[in-house]
Image (cartoon, grey):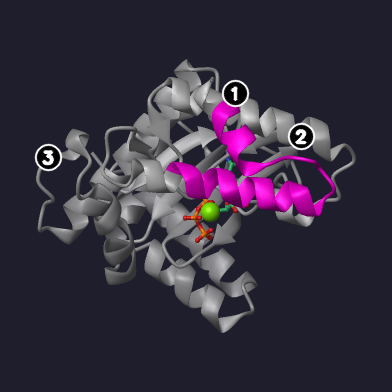
């Protein structure tokens, strides 16, 4: 049974964000994310005790929105995929050819739910291989709940936004994470300084929804692109590395 009073309180909380968000584009984003159905799913997570408050939006992107929430054991991050044509277009190309997902389904909503499940599973698989990613906690419809990286006030910054004190060490750390991702048979597929959080000096790999198994038709191309992106970034920071050498290291050769 839905507790109407609780639901109303939640509606109010969402409304208060809307009022706080001054920028018109952001307001539109929040309105679109919390459609009635998503609100019901968020409510279900409340009821199951996954978290008891949604504290603030961390990021409002074109396809996904991430919120910091407080749960019984501390903070968690909630990622909500928008049920929109843009999201659908973006993800279809990654799901085609992934044997774990069989035939691509026509139903937009179902595909987006499947996409959230895929990110959750990729996080599980990477966690099992000791890759430093946010620990996956829960997955429901178009949402995933995971470990929150950051402090009570501030989410951890992206690699692209920090001054890196010891680029060699951070680069080594990332290469080791890539080796472990490869070890569990996956390719990240969208790796760059935009999808790595810095938890102090420790890089944390995020946004693994488009990750594909090594047998995927695009796996080799995306594997090389990931490594090229990150190597290019660190070479700019003064690290001496050649692409072929890094690729070999990641393959464990
Ligand atoms: N577990 C987390 N803890 C703290 N912050 C997070 C976490 N996961 C994601 N974020 C923040 O949310 C942002 C968006 O997350 P993510 O990269 O997974 O989604 P996205 O689909 O790429 O969205 P966008 O299009 O906005 O980049 C990240 O850039 C990061 O700042
Ligand atoms: Mg991202």
Whether residue 138 sits left or right of residue 15 in the image: it is: left
Q: CA distance from mark 1 to mark 3?
A: 37 Å
The answer to which of marks 1 and 3 sits earlier in the sequence is 1
Give how far apart the Cα atoms at labels 2 and 3 are: 37 Å
SS label for mark 3: loop
Is 70 in front, or is 142?
142
Q: Residue at x 86, y 50 (%)?
A: 163
Disc 1 crowd rating (10 Å Cα; few below 14, some 14-19, many 20+) is few
The one nearer the camera, 104 or 78, is 104
Residue 122, horizontal then vertical, whole percent: 39, 32
Q: Could you tell me which secondary element the residue under label 2 belongs to?
A: helix
- Circle 2 residue: 170
The residue carrying pointer 2 sits among few (fewer than 14), some (14 to 19) or many (20 or more) residues within 10 Å by Cα, namely some
Q: What residue is shown at x 41% (from left), y 40% (from top)? A: 144
Identify the residue under disc 3.
Answer: 102
Reading the image, the residue beneath label 1 is 73
């Amino acid at each position: 049974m839905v507790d109407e009073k609780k639901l109303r309180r939640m509606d109010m909380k969402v409304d208060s964000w809307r009022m706080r968000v001054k920028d018109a584009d952001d307001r539109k984003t929040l309105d679109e994310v919390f459609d009635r159905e998503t609100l019901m799913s968020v409510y279900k997570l409340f009821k199951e005790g996954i978290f008891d408050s949604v504290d603030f939006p961390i990021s409002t992107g074109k396809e996904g929105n991430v919120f910091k929430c407080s749960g019984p054991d501390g903070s968690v991050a909630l990622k909500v995929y928008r049920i929109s044509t843009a999201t659908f277009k973006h993800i279809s190309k990654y799901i085609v050819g992934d044997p774990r997902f069989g035939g691509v389904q026509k139903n937009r909503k179902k595909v987006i739910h499947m996409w959230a499940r895929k990110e959750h599973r990729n996080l599980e698989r990477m966690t099992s291989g000791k890759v430093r990613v946010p620990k996956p906690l829960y997955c429901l419809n178009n949402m995933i709940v995971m470990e929150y990286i950051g402090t009570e006030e501030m989410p951890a910054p992206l690699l692209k936004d920090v001054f890196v004190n010891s680029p060699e060490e951070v680069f080594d750390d990332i290469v080791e994470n890539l080796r472990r991702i490869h070890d569990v048979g996956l390719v990240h597929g969208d790796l760059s300084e935009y999808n790595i959080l810095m938890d102090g000096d420790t890089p944390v790999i995020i946004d693994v929804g488009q990750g594909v198994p090594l047998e995927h038709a695009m796996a080799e191309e995306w594997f090389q692109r990931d490594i090229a992106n990150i190597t290019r970034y660190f070479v700019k920071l003064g690290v001496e590395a050649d692409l072929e050498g890094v690729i070999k290291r990641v393959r464990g050769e």
